[in-house]
Amino acid sequence: MKQTNSNIKYKQFQYEDRVVIITLIKEGFNYSQIANHFGVPVSQVSREIKRNSKRVYNAKTAQTRSDVRRFQPKKEIK
């Protein structure tokens, strides 16, 4: 029986977490293993890497992009 991630809470990645993500990727960890390391859903790790990388995932660039997105005004719903 497959376990669900309903008991895993959302955690926003910080710069230090992003550095660990890079290290784990370089060590050959897959998204599922990285998610288990942080106690977050696999989809969160996948989105983090996809959203914050062009060719290679970079912690500093990812943090900068995250900060910019956080403080951008939200789109108005009509």
Image (cartoon, grey):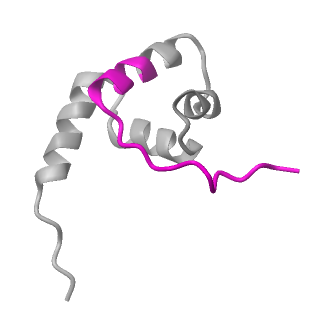
Query: Considering depth in this image, is 61 or 9 the residue closer to the camera?
Result: 9
Query: Considering depth in this image, is 3 or 21 the residue closer to the camera?
Result: 3
Outermost residue, front side: 7
Q: Residue drawn 28% across and 26% down?
A: 15
Is residue 75 among what the camera can see? yes
The rendered magenta stretch, by its main secondary structure, is classed as loop
Outermost residue, right side: 1
Is residue 57 among what the camera can see? no
Residue 19 versus residue 43 in the image, above or below:
above
Residue 26 versus residue 10 in the image, above or below:
above
Q: Is 49 displayed left or right of 78 in the figure? A: right
Q: Residue drawn 45% across and 49% down?
A: 10
Residue 10 is one of the magenta-drawn residues:
yes
Residue 57 is one of the magenta-drawn residues:
no
Q: Position of residue 58 (x, y in %)?
A: 31, 23
Q: Position of residue 51 (x, y in %)?
A: 35, 43
Q: Position of residue 37 (x, y in %)?
A: 57, 27
Q: Residue drawn 36% across and 26% down?
A: 18
Q: Residue drawn 35% across and 18% down?
A: 19
Picture quarter with the C terminus = bottom left
Q: Is 58 displayed left or right of 8 in the figure? A: left
Residue 2 versus residue 60 in the image, above or below:
below
What is the magenta range? 1-21
* Quadrant assignment, res 63: top left
